[in-house]
Amino acid sequence: MGVEKIAFYILSALTLGGGVAILFSVRLMRSVVYLLVSLFGVAGLFILMGADFLAALQVLIYVGGITVLLVFGLMLTGPSQFQNQEENRLKAITSGVCSVAIAIVLLLIVRKTQWPTGGVAASETAGGIGRLLLTQNVFAFEIASVLLLVVLVGVALFMRLARSNRS
Amino acid sequence: MITLQEYLTVAALLFSLGLLIVLFRNNAISILMGIELMLNAANINFVAFSQSLGGLAGQVFALFVIVAAAAEAAVAIAIIVLMYQNLGTTDVEKAKNLNG
Amino acid sequence: MNELANFLPTVLSRSGLTVPSALIPVLAMFLCASIMAAFMGLSAAVLVWAERKLAGHFQCRLGPVYVGGKFGWLQSIADGIKLLLKEDIIPDQADRPLFRLAPYPVVIGVLLAFIAVPFSEKLMVTDFNIGVFFILAVLTVEVFGVILAGWASNNKWALLGAMRAAVQMVSYEIPMGLAILPVVVMAQSLSLKTIVAAQSGGALHWFVFQPPFFMAVSFLIFFIAGLASLKRAPFDLPEAESELTAGFHTEYSGMRFSFFFMAEYAGMLLVSAVASALYLGGWHGILPGQESVWWFLAKTGFLIFVMIWIRWTLPRLRIDQIVYVGWKVLTPFVLACVVGQSLWATLR
């Protein structure tokens, strides 16, 4: 078993283990930490797949942006919300059945399909991604920037609403 | 060498875990975390295909997914905070004003 | 690191040890890691001494100037011994696992970022394709540790400090990331080695001194945002001692506190090193053809001196002022720099 394989198993264990821990943790702050572990696992998998730029982006945006945002949102709600509520048993059973069914279907698809292989992974990711973004995908790139602008304005408006609610 | 199928298996498991969290949990912030896990599972798939097919198209797509995830998280947190101010809870089961 | 891996077998065979060849890269990795960690610890100690001593001169404090006879050299050793011998107290109401965990992301973030710092042409751990971007990404991990520390302490001062750290990060992160872009446009690479190599040929080729001086402006912005990322005065709101006792690390003591302490000083070294590699020509000297680590260290040391100088002379900003500066002053300026530099690069 090569080093790559061992790294793959450790990273997958981190990714999935973080997910399982989120599922079972009661305190929300701890689940944010588990989410972080899981996201780092995914970043590691990206590095294994040769996507170094994407891995750095993953750490930058998820750790620096989304988890901080989650903690922030958590702090802006009250202490009564810091823990998960008791879930009822029916909900647990139905949701468990649904997701296990989906997992089985997905795994069967992964097993049964003949996946195409034999491509050569690109060696220089950052430059290549930049070139693709400004040539082939320039429209999507612009749409993404419009999306971000809309979100910025929209959230600012939301928060203004929140402030007028309070007063 | 790690095959494409192994990556896809991890992604499939992560996706169903995320789905389970979304379905099972009542708290809006937990649900948001489940959604992030599902998006990450999709990203693993994109990057794995991009590696096995060659080229960078999959990685560019994953980049757009990350952008969308950041935007979605910002909006969702704003909604959750507003919901807490109006209803005093972040339990999605209790947000039933639209039921009539 | 590769040089080290090539160099190791000869050293080992000369000292009469036999090591399987598969283990050599692993050994080189461990050696590299321990060298970097030792370097970080040592430089933190020297910087603490420098800070105390300079502060002593700036504000007429007697202790650090005289401890140990000459130059006050004993100060940081005394500090270190004191911290190591102190009891590691965990508050009763704290979230214990998170409280114990929180210092590690802070140290690991800074230590990881050192991997990509080019001390000289040969002396760097590895040259990443995406070096600058990697450093930015890894540094964000530190902030999460700070927030975690503030939350887990279960103390109002600590929580306020953590909230401030989060707000501050949201406002400095964007100018800091954008300030790097003009340099990347000029060097056409994200790799720090290539960026430094593009500045060879004397002081006039350093990126700060290149007309039309967009990069000089972005250097200033990077330095200001870097100060904010280090949580140093005038941006030391998360640990403002006159309002929040000690901010996010109020409840920390002993070893765990010294982790935060060390991370701050290693962070100073890191930001100064990155700034001097990006804008001040890295290992290139003032005259053409001069190349050595010492130039790099001299520039870094100068930037650190400026940081200490700022800390002991300027008063602290308010949190709304930091958000204002980040979003309404630095971001528009840095955007103008990026656009201007790109235009200049294409039109030239």
Image (cartoon, coloured by chain):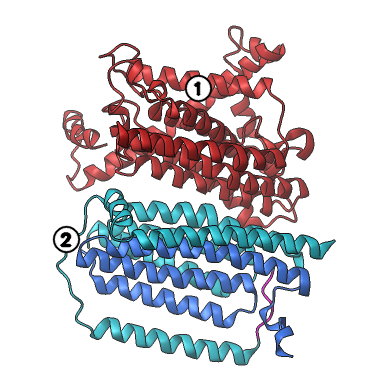
Chain colours: A cyan, B blue, C red
Q: Residue furthest right?
A: A167
Which quadrant does the N terminus of chain C fall into? top left
2 and 1 marks on the same chain:
no
The residue pinned by badge 1 equals: C303
In percent of the image, x 57 and y 37: which residue is there?
A: C330
Indicate whether residue C100 is drawn in magenta: no
SS category of the residue bearing label 2: loop
Which quadrant does the C terminus of chain C fall into? top left
Label 1: chain letter:
C
Percent of width and height locating residue C37: 43, 35
Is residue C331 in view?
yes
In percent of the image, x 28 and y 52: which residue is there?
A: A131
Q: Is residue C176 above or below residue B64?
A: above
For the magenta stretch, what is the residue range?
A83-87
Picture disc at residue A120: 2
Q: Residues within 10 Å of mark 2 (few under 14, many from 20)?
A: few
Q: Nearer the viewer, residue C88 or C302?
A: C302
